[in-house]
Image: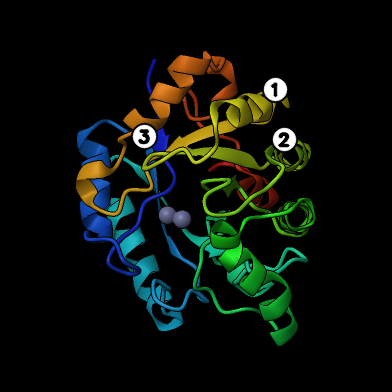
Amino acid sequence: MKYLGDYHTHTVYSHGKGTVDMNVRRAAEIGLEEVAITDHGYRHTTYNVRRTDYKYMRRDVTDANAHYPVKVYLGLETNLHGRYGEIDVTEADIEDLDILLCGYHKLVYSPTVKEFFSFYVPTFFAPMFGTSDRRRAINTEAYIKAIEKHPIDVITHLEYTIDVDVAAVAQAAKEYGTFIELNGKKVSMTDEQVAAVVGTGVGIILNSDAHSPGRVGDFSVPQAVVDRLKIPPEQIVNLDKLPDFRLQKLKGGRK
Ligand SMILES: [Zn+2]
Ligand SMILES: [Zn+2]
């Protein structure tokens, strides 16, 4: 069995170490059929892609598509930054993306002052002062609203520094055709949480989250979870097959 694509990699356009070309070359070397360049969304305070750079990213991806026998997607790992499912791209931005990832990260500008106090601050400090059922419900609702409102292909590193009802998020993801990632750096969910996610029947995707070219396609960390929990191979959308991405389907299907 073989993973055919890695859909979450970073480059120098945010805080990765390699260029687009280096990530794609690595993907070609290890025999991947597809790879995605997904740097951090525009409203991260320190790791964001600069809007003015997006056209250069597109140029690099077009070049790489022409030079390597790998299909290259250009996307963003957008930030979930509001309790009503706000993410840090506009509808027009999404039209220019090939793939849309979404995750929760700290140090992201809030869409409004109200959101800063009602989502950013309590979520930021929850790991230090403990969470609550109410906080967890708000976070869960934020993810579900994001999945409902935006054509998100992949929820990255669920439960990483944020407390959510992962099964409820996974259930919404399944309904809308969004995949839940097992992240290549760290699986933040407990085994019980992963089992609950898998139990919903949602599509599972393994991604490297590589921040250096040498890590593209490295799924060893999440693979240990897959093996331990005996996740059915047919439920893993990039194992021996290519995923049917929500955004691509909206745009008329895989070319
Ligand atoms: Zn991330
Ligand atoms: Zn990432």
What kind of element bears circle 3? loop
- Residue 217 locus on image (x, y percent): 31, 37
Q: Which color scheme does this rendered protein use?
A: rainbow
Do the residues bearing badges 2 and 1 touch, measured as CB atoms within 8 Å? Answer: yes
What amino acid type is highlighted by mark number 2? Answer: Ala
| Residue at screen point 35% across, 60% down | 62
The tally of labels here is: 3
* Label 3 vs label 2, nearer the camera: 2
Q: Earlier in the sequence, mark 2 or mark 1?
A: 2
Q: Is mark 1 within 8 Å of ligand 1?
A: no
- Structural distance between the alpha carbons of marks 3 and 2: 31 Å
Residue at image mark 2: 167
Residue at image mark 3: 33
Residue 163 appears in view: yes
Q: Earlier in the sequence, mark 1 or mark 3?
A: 3
- Structural distance between the alpha carbons of marks 2 and 1: 8 Å
133 or 192, which lies in front?
Answer: 133
Do the residues bearing badges 3 and 2 touch, measured as CB atoms within 8 Å? Answer: no
201 or 105, which lies in front?
Answer: 105
| Residue at screen point 51% across, 67% down | 106
| Residue at screen point 72% across, 35% down | 167
Q: Which mark is residue 101?
A: none
134 or 183, which lies in front?
Answer: 134
- Residue 196 locus on image (x, y percent): 68, 27
Q: Is residue 130 left or right of residue 141?
A: left
- Structural distance between the alpha carbons of marks 1 and 3: 29 Å
Depicted 78 relative to depicted 180: above or below: below
Quarter of the figure with the N terminus: top left
What kind of element bears circle 2? helix
